[in-house]
Amino acid sequence: MESNQELAGKVVVVTGSGRGIGKQIAIGAGLRGAKVALVEVIEENLEATSKEISAMGINVKGYLTDLSKESDVVNNFAKIEKWQEEKAFEHTKNRRPDLLDNE
Ligand SMILES: NC(=O)c1ccc[n+]([C@@H]2O[C@H](COP(=O)([O-])OP(=O)(O)OC[C@H]3O[C@@H](n4cnc5c(N)ncnc54)[C@H](O)[C@@H]3O)[C@@H](O)[C@H]2O)c1
Protein backbone atom coordinates (compact mmCIF):
# COMPACT_ATOMS: atom_id res chain seq x y z
CA MET A 1 0.00 0.00 0.00
CA GLU A 2 1.18 3.53 -0.82
CA SER A 3 2.79 5.37 2.08
CA ASN A 4 3.27 9.14 2.51
CA GLN A 5 2.60 11.87 5.08
CA GLU A 6 -0.29 13.74 3.49
CA LEU A 7 -2.50 13.19 6.59
CA ALA A 8 0.17 14.12 9.16
CA GLY A 9 -1.29 16.11 12.04
CA LYS A 10 -4.80 14.79 11.49
CA VAL A 11 -6.94 12.38 13.49
CA VAL A 12 -9.02 10.06 11.33
CA VAL A 13 -11.97 8.33 13.01
CA VAL A 14 -12.99 5.09 11.29
CA THR A 15 -16.24 3.38 12.27
CA GLY A 16 -16.66 -0.37 11.82
CA SER A 17 -12.88 -0.69 11.68
CA GLY A 18 -12.46 -4.09 13.36
CA ARG A 19 -12.34 -5.81 9.99
CA GLY A 20 -13.15 -5.45 6.31
CA ILE A 21 -13.35 -2.09 4.57
CA GLY A 22 -13.06 -0.08 7.78
CA LYS A 23 -9.84 -1.83 8.78
CA GLN A 24 -8.31 -1.16 5.37
CA ILE A 25 -9.36 2.51 5.51
CA ALA A 26 -7.72 2.76 8.94
CA ILE A 27 -4.47 1.26 7.62
CA GLY A 28 -4.56 3.51 4.56
CA ALA A 29 -5.01 6.63 6.69
CA GLY A 30 -2.29 5.57 9.14
CA LEU A 31 0.21 4.91 6.35
CA ARG A 32 -0.46 8.45 5.18
CA GLY A 33 0.58 9.85 8.55
CA ALA A 34 -2.77 10.16 10.37
CA LYS A 35 -3.41 9.20 13.95
CA VAL A 36 -6.26 6.70 13.80
CA ALA A 37 -9.21 6.24 16.17
CA LEU A 38 -10.79 2.82 15.65
CA VAL A 39 -14.51 2.62 16.50
CA GLU A 40 -15.82 -0.93 16.63
CA VAL A 41 -18.43 -3.00 18.51
CA ILE A 42 -16.67 -6.39 18.61
CA GLU A 43 -14.00 -6.23 21.31
CA GLU A 44 -11.91 -9.12 19.99
CA ASN A 45 -11.71 -7.58 16.52
CA LEU A 46 -10.97 -4.14 17.94
CA GLU A 47 -8.05 -5.46 19.99
CA ALA A 48 -6.63 -7.57 17.16
CA THR A 49 -6.87 -4.72 14.66
CA SER A 50 -5.38 -2.22 17.12
CA LYS A 51 -2.39 -4.51 17.68
CA GLU A 52 -1.90 -5.21 14.00
CA ILE A 53 -2.05 -1.54 13.00
CA SER A 54 0.11 -0.43 15.92
CA ALA A 55 2.76 -2.97 14.86
CA MET A 56 2.90 -1.15 11.52
CA GLY A 57 4.15 1.94 13.36
CA ILE A 58 0.82 3.76 13.19
CA ASN A 59 -0.43 5.83 16.16
CA VAL A 60 -3.76 4.11 16.82
CA LYS A 61 -6.27 3.92 19.65
CA GLY A 62 -9.37 1.71 19.88
CA TYR A 63 -12.80 2.78 21.18
CA LEU A 64 -15.23 -0.05 21.92
CA THR A 65 -18.51 1.46 20.70
CA ASP A 66 -21.93 0.28 19.60
CA LEU A 67 -22.88 2.87 16.99
CA SER A 68 -26.56 1.97 17.41
CA LYS A 69 -26.51 3.34 20.99
CA GLU A 70 -26.51 7.11 21.26
CA SER A 71 -24.97 7.24 24.73
CA ASP A 72 -22.13 4.96 23.60
CA VAL A 73 -21.44 7.22 20.62
CA VAL A 74 -21.55 10.43 22.69
CA ASN A 75 -19.26 9.01 25.39
CA ASN A 76 -16.69 7.56 23.03
CA PHE A 77 -16.52 10.52 20.67
CA ALA A 78 -15.92 12.72 23.71
CA LYS A 79 -13.00 10.42 24.58
CA ILE A 80 -11.70 10.63 21.03
CA GLU A 81 -11.81 14.43 21.16
CA LYS A 82 -9.88 14.34 24.43
CA TRP A 83 -7.22 12.04 22.93
CA GLN A 84 -7.06 14.30 19.93
CA GLU A 85 -6.52 17.36 22.09
CA GLU A 86 -3.84 15.60 24.14
CA LYS A 87 -1.88 14.04 21.31
CA ALA A 88 -2.89 14.96 17.83
CA PHE A 89 -2.65 18.64 17.22
CA GLU A 90 0.44 19.65 19.11
CA HIS A 91 1.76 21.41 16.00
CA THR A 92 -1.40 22.79 14.43
CA LYS A 93 -4.36 24.99 15.26
CA ASN A 94 -6.82 22.56 13.66
CA ARG A 95 -8.55 20.79 16.56
CA ARG A 96 -11.44 19.02 14.85
CA PRO A 97 -11.29 15.37 13.72
CA ASP A 98 -11.77 14.46 10.09
CA LEU A 99 -14.57 11.92 10.13
CA LEU A 100 -14.71 8.94 7.81
CA ASP A 101 -17.90 6.92 8.03
CA ASN A 102 -17.89 3.27 7.00
CA GLU A 103 -21.56 2.56 6.53
N1 LIG B 1 -17.37 -5.69 1.16
C1 LIG B 1 -17.82 -5.14 0.03
O1 LIG B 1 -17.42 -5.49 -1.09
C2 LIG B 1 -18.82 -4.00 0.09
C3 LIG B 1 -19.18 -3.37 -1.09
C4 LIG B 1 -20.07 -2.31 -1.03
C5 LIG B 1 -20.57 -1.89 0.20
N2 LIG B 1 -20.23 -2.53 1.33
C6 LIG B 1 -20.78 -2.04 2.59
O2 LIG B 1 -19.74 -1.42 3.34
C7 LIG B 1 -19.94 -1.68 4.75
C8 LIG B 1 -18.71 -2.39 5.35
O3 LIG B 1 -18.46 -3.60 4.61
P1 LIG B 1 -17.48 -4.70 5.16
O4 LIG B 1 -17.35 -5.74 4.12
O5 LIG B 1 -16.21 -4.03 5.67
O6 LIG B 1 -18.35 -5.25 6.38
P2 LIG B 1 -17.90 -6.13 7.63
O7 LIG B 1 -19.15 -6.74 8.15
O8 LIG B 1 -16.75 -7.04 7.30
O9 LIG B 1 -17.34 -5.05 8.67
C9 LIG B 1 -18.19 -4.16 9.31
C10 LIG B 1 -17.57 -3.82 10.67
O10 LIG B 1 -18.48 -2.96 11.34
C11 LIG B 1 -18.64 -3.42 12.67
N3 LIG B 1 -19.95 -3.03 13.18
C12 LIG B 1 -21.16 -3.54 12.86
N4 LIG B 1 -22.14 -2.98 13.58
C13 LIG B 1 -21.54 -2.07 14.40
C14 LIG B 1 -22.01 -1.18 15.41
N5 LIG B 1 -23.31 -1.11 15.74
N6 LIG B 1 -21.11 -0.38 16.04
C15 LIG B 1 -19.80 -0.45 15.73
N7 LIG B 1 -19.28 -1.27 14.80
C16 LIG B 1 -20.14 -2.09 14.14
C17 LIG B 1 -18.53 -4.92 12.56
O11 LIG B 1 -18.27 -5.53 13.81
C18 LIG B 1 -17.39 -5.06 11.55
O12 LIG B 1 -16.13 -5.02 12.18
C19 LIG B 1 -21.21 -2.55 4.86
O13 LIG B 1 -22.31 -1.69 5.11
C20 LIG B 1 -21.30 -3.17 3.48
O14 LIG B 1 -22.64 -3.51 3.17
C21 LIG B 1 -19.35 -3.58 1.29
Image: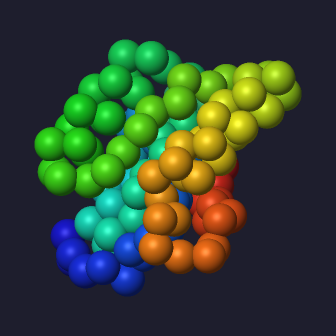
In this view, the residue in front, 7 or 21, is 7
Depicted 35 relative to depicted 31: above or below? above
Depicted 35 relative to depicted 17: above or below? below
Residue 33 falls left or right of residue 42: left
| Residue 72 in picture, x, y percent from top left | 74, 23
Residue 16 visible in the shown view: no
Tell me the quarter of the picture where residue 4 sits: bottom left
Point out the residue furthest to the right here: 70
Q: Locate the N terminus by quadrant.
A: bottom left
In this view, the residue in front, 44 or 51, is 51
Q: Residue at x 21, y 75 (%)?
A: 3
Q: Which residue is drawn at 31% across and 34% down?
A: 49
Q: Which colour scheme is used?
A: rainbow
| Residue 25 in picture, x, y percent from top left | 42, 58
Residue 65 falls left or right of residue 46: right
Q: In which quarter of the image is ligand 1?
A: top right
